[in-house]
Image: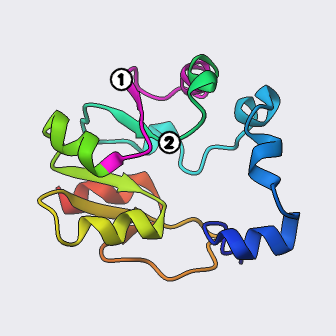
Amino acid sequence: KLDYWSVPHMDSVLGQGWFSKIAPVKEFWETIPTLSAPSSIDFDFDYYISSFPQDMYDVRVEWLKKNGFPDKPLIVTNDKLNKCLQLGVGLIVDDKPEFMKTLQDSPVRGIHFITHYAGFEPVGKYVTSLSQVKQYL
């Protein structure tokens, strides 16, 4: 179990400045493993909304294609809540606990995606596979 969203914890595990070291590494973004099989997506959706280095946009689009995910627009933002509000998104699935907490007092509903190695508690409704999302629609 790993609290991978805690900066102090990850600094203690990987060393200070670890993200700035991996952020520009194309191979890192190309080889991120899938957390849920694309075939488990049995619902329609409008966008992928993600936060990552903007200069890795094409790499992420290629990653989605290579791994067989549905062809949908990829939106890059560090302010997912405002982007959801701008786009009229009413429901988002995300794995970051702090983001899930920001949704609690907003009109956007959140489903917390919890990995098998998450070292933190889920915030609100959660799934461990995208095949479980449909129960909340």
- x 54%, y 21%: residue: 61
Q: Residue furthest bottom?
A: 121
Determine whether 85 is above or below 12 in the image: above
**Amino acid found under the numbered disc labelled 2:** Ser
Task: Give residue 51's mark.
Answer: 2
Q: Secondary structure at mark 2?
A: loop
The magenta segment is: 60-80
73 is within the stretch colored magenta: yes
Q: Which residue type carries mark 1? A: Lys
* Residue 87 screen position, x and y as percent: 18, 34
Expressed as whole percent of the image width and height from the top left, the position of residue 82 reads 25, 46
In reply to whether residue 122 is colored magenta, the answer given is no
- Residue at figure coordinates x 26%, y 64% from the top left: 103
Identify the element where label 1 is drawn.
loop
Is residue 1 left or right of 64 when viewed as pictured?
Answer: right
Q: Which residue is mark 1?
A: 72
Q: Say which mark, if any, is on residue 12.
A: none
Residue visible at 84% across and 75% down?
12
Mark closer to the chain start, 1 or 2: 2
